[in-house]
Structures are given as structure tokens and as C-alpha cells.
Image (cartoon, rainbow, N blue to C red):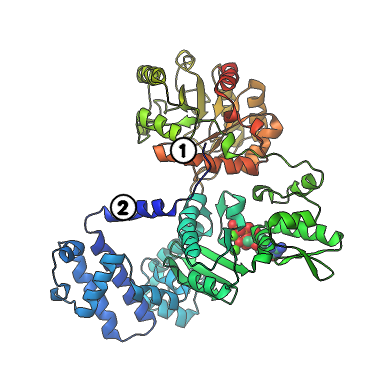
Amino acid sequence: MKEPSDKPEALANEIALAAGSRVGATNERIVAIFDEIADLLDVENANPFRVRAYRNAARSIGALTEDVGAMLARGTDLATLPGIGTDLAGKMREIAETGGSELLTRLRRETPGQIQMLLSLPGLGPRRVHRLEHDLNVHTMEDLAAAAREHRVGMLPGFGPRTEQRLLDAVQARLDRHRRFSLDVAMRAVDPLMAHLRSCGAAQDLAVAGSYRRGRDTVGDLDIAVASGRPQAVIHAFLAYGQTRSVISAGSTRASTVLMNDMQVDLRVVPASSYGAALVYLTGSKAHNVALRKMAQARGLKLNEYGVFRQGRKIAGRDEASIYEALGLPWIAPELREDTGELDAARDGKLPHLVEARDIQGDLHVHTNESDGVDSLEAMVMAAGRDGLQYLAITDHSPRLGITHGLNASRLAAQSDAIDALNAKGGLPTILKGIEVDILEDGSLDLPDAVLGRLDLVVGAIHSHFDLPADKQTARLLRAIDHPHFSILAHPFARLIGEREACRFDAVRVFRALAERGACVEANGQPRRLDVWDTGCRLAKSSGVQVSIASDAHRSADFRNLAWGLTQARRGWLEAADVLNTRSLSRLRAILKKTM
Ligand code: DGT
Ligand code: CA
Ligand code: CA
């Protein structure tokens, strides 16, 4: 596996392509922007005629049968359209050319973020928001939820009990959804923001810290540390970022904003001589920081976000290693900084040598378009090769999963021939023959043993009956693992972050059974799954179970999921020797053979 690289340009292109590929996309964008401008002007108590002009324009653009972009390309004067004057025509051209509007950016910056969130709820326009603020003192989503629960909203003129319930549902959904973000969503926000901050030229060094850097499976908000001698310039650039929805606070060395995706960003600027200290502080976790500070105090030192001090004299701060060194410790990887034993381990020289991207030799959970994947067998194998993998296992679904077009015995045999042919060609990663076989409700497997026995490995997973009582779920998994051919238990908890809870079973017993059988457990790297996650990786290690870090790729770009799985493995203290797919192909085959 190659080292991860961030390519914000490529990502931005991808997004632009996706946005531009729809017919009438420009019109939709103009309508959305004009509507939002009208709402925000209304909140500002702007001239009602101006507000109405934007609303009317949005309506007439929505009714157009031709794309505004195409009209501009033909040289049409937009001011000749009904309800559009020269001013609005200019705004339309701006949106068509840049995708955004300076007026909207300014209005968003001026309107409190919470008011914008209220406005974005279905059924809430400026009038109603004004009434909520005025009559009920409701200024935030939380205020609104509380007022609705106390039935104070339904009593307002123009609201009523049904509106109240609808609003409560919408707020609740929004609060639940936005409390924490999955890592891929966070990354899509991080990459362009960091590129923007780098481009201002005032940052000597910068990094995302907080839970994002520690690789937690979800992040609440982003924390950015910047080293600079010109903090004002950095703050200025940060506030001017185009994806900023609103500014929560802004000072001379720190600022907080909310991005368009509702994610909060806290930025802190320090001199380069304190950058390491700020990075340690902002990376956390809070528990790790508190424990570190205690260690400092025990040595008669003071630790804060500017450095380590002995009697007021700074003895460390420029980089992270200097901070830890001043406390008598080796540098500790961010993934371990949860105060779960890493400080003792560091002091005793017993920190693990965490598994790294370059240790990963292959991927043992990959789909093709034979089941629910997007790309062909050949495309997946070529992509795995480009990503530096030595081998991959093709593990399409079994027949029970109807919606995935799962493979029966004869289609599996045909796939096996195709794999033989590709392997014979050479020059590509070696392809192993596998299946993601469905574990049925009673713990039996969805294909006969005779069919499974012809494969190189069997990956088993549950895709139904997630909410069985714990004892039944445990029995189901134990029975599945007991099959004569069972190599890897895939995404055992079947959780979907923010959508489906982890299913309940006796993990200690199940992992013990895997250990006895010589079978492995998967650290699935799909950012919505991350299953097992850090604690499961740690349990695997203490149970003597090898972990397969897997992409569960459904398209050629998905091999990057390996990096997410790797992060969870590192958070679980795993070393290369604890991870199945760090093995060479021949050693891997030997281990898999014992499970088959
Ligand atoms: P999150 O955002 O909920 O996913 O989790 P974090 O860990 O990013 O937490 P956040 O954003 O509240 O704070 C960022 C870092 O700042 C945190 O990891 C450690 C540091 N920090 C925050 N509050 C405190 C505190 O009260 N004491 C100390 N020592 N550090 C703190
Ligand atoms: Ca954070
Ligand atoms: Ca924060």
C-alpha cells in the first residue's frame, strides 16, 4: 500500500464534475442562491422590494426551460428575461461563472450561524424565525427543540401542533446527524481548507489536530494548529475561506467558524517556537493532556500550549518530540493519545511499533461488478496494483443477498476461471479466490461446504437480523465460525456510523472461538463501517486473533479505505505482526490454509 497523499485539486475536480454533469445545474444553483439571499436579506430587515426582487427572480429562473449557462454561451442578454434587471443579470453571470455569489458569502458571514441553521429547516422562513426569536426567545436549534417539546411552538399564530411536531422531528434529525461526522466527510472538508490556508503564504507550518489527527472513528469538530509570525494574515485568510457558512468568533490569534457542511472549525495560531506545544495541546485527547501535565508537574515543570517551562524559562516547544523529550518520554503517535496506558508504556520503553501503510501487502475483501461492485475484476486488480498491493482476494457476495446479485456456485466457477486467466498473464497483483458468504440467521452459511472448500479463503458476514438478542447473536456467530471453511469474520458488529447501532453479542467468546479456530477478524475500512474499530482491534490482539485490514472496495478508488482501517488498527495498538495482510503471499497462504 502506498503512503496516503492528499490531492485537494483532484478532489475539487471530482466535485466540480459531479456538480456540472447535470442538465440545468446552473439554474438550480442560481435559484438556491437567490432564495437564500432573499431569506438572509429578510432576516436583516432589508428593503422588502429588494427581497421580493430576489424571490421573483428565483421563481422565474426556476421556470426556464433552458440552462442559463447555455444562454450565456450563446450571448443572450439575461436582463431581457422577465423579472431580471441588470443587477440580477450580473449576479446570475457571477454564479454561472464562479458557482458562488459574493453577496451571499457576505450575508452568510453577517448572519449568526444558528439563525441560518433555523432557516434551513423545512417549513421555517424568515417570518417564522423572526416570530420564534421574538415571542419564544428561540435562537438556536437546541432552543427550538426545547420549546417544541414544551408545546410552546404550536401555540404561536401560524404554527399549530402539526407544524410543531414536524419541526421537532427535523431539528432532532439534524442535531443527531450533525453531532459527529464520519472521517470521509471530515476529510472532504479538510483537504480544500488546508490547501486554502497554505496558499495564503503566512503559515510556516500547519496541521489538523484534535480527534481527526488521533483518527477517532468520528469527529465532532476540526481543530487546526498554525505556526506563523503573522497571525492576523492567517486569521484573515481563514475567515475569507469560501466554504465558510458563518463566523462564531474571531480574535487576533484564534477563530472559530462553521463550514457549509455544518462542521465547526477551531483555528489557533502560535509562533513557530511554540508550534509543537500547540500541536500536542490541540491534538489531545483531553485525558492525555491532563495526564501529561501531571507528569510535567511531578518533574517541577509547567506544560501548556506554548511550551514546557522550568521556573518560567522555556525549555521546549518547537516540535512535538521536544515536548515529550522534556518530560522524559519518546514521541507518542497521535492514535495512541487516549490515556489508555500509552504514557506508562512510553515511560517504560514499551510503546508498540505501530503497523504502517507500507507494511500492508494486500487486501482480502474486494468486490467486483459480478455482485454489487461497480468495476470489473480486471479494473479492480489493476487499481490494486497501482496502489502498490502484492495480492488481493476477490470476495463477491453469496446468492442470499438478492439485491447484490450474489454469486451461486456456477457463477463462482466462472469467476474462478477468469481469475486463473488473469493470474496466468502475470505482471499484476496475485488474485486469491474468495467469497463474502452471508451468515444466515441460524449461523449456517449461504453456500455448501463443498463449494466453499474450492476457494482460497472464506469471508463470512451478517447482513440481516442485526437486532437478535445477544445470546442468539453469539450462538449464530459461533456456529458460523465453526464451519469447516471459515477464514475471516468481516465487519462483525455490522454497525453503520450514524445509521445503525452495532449489534450485540459476547465479543470475548466470539474472539476466543476465532483464536481457537485459527481464523481472523476484519478491520473494515469503509468510513461508514470502521468495523472492528480501535477497541475491537485491541480485543483481537489480547485474544490472539489476527486482524485483516480490508478496504471492502466496491470500486477501483476504494482501496484508499485501507488507510481508514489502518488508523483503527493503530489506535488498537496493533503492530505489523498482528495484521494478517502484512504477510508475504506465501506466509498468508499458509495461514489461510489452516482455516480451509
Ligand atoms: P471531538 O472534536 O469531539 O471529536 O474531539 P476532540 O478531541 O477534537 O476535542 P475538542 O475539539 O473539544 O478539543 C480539541 C483538543 O483540545 C482536545 O483533544 C484536547 C484539547 N482540549 C480541549 N479542552 C481541553 C481541556 O479542558 N483541557 C485540556 N488539557 N485540553 C483540552
Ligand atoms: Ca475536535
Ligand atoms: Ca474543537
Q: Residues within 10 Å of mark 1 (few under 14, many from 20)?
A: many
Can the viewer see residue 567? yes
The residues tagged by marks 2 and 1 sit, at their Cα atoms, a distance apart of 22 Å
- The residue under label 2 is 17
> Where residue 16 appears, x then y in whole percent?
33, 55
Residue type indicated by callout 1: Phe
Q: Residues within 10 Å of mark 2 (few under 14, many from 20)?
A: few
- The residue under label 1 is 559
Image quarter hosting the C terminus: top right
For this rendering, which residue is in front, 371 or 421? 421
For this rendering, which residue is in front, 593 or 490? 593
In contact (CB < 8 Å): disc 2 and disc 1: no
> Where residue 424 appears, x then y in whole percent?
40, 17
x 41%, y 76%: residue:
129
x 49%, y 34%: residue:
388
Can you tell me which quadrant of the image ligand 1 is in? bottom right
x 46%, y 79%: residue:
133
> Where residue 197 appears, x then y in whole percent?
50, 64
x 64%, y 61%: residue:
282
Label ID, residue 72: none
Residue positioned most to the top:
450
- Drawn side of residue 266 relative to residue 112, left or right: right
For this rendering, which residue is in front, 480 or 563? 563
For this rendering, which residue is in front, 439 or 67? 67
The reply to whether the residue tagged 2 has its Cβ within 8 angstroms of ligand 2 is no
> Where residue 21 appears, x then y in whole percent?
26, 52
Can the viewer see residue 530? no
Q: Name the element at disc 2.
A: helix
Residue type indicated by callout 2: Leu
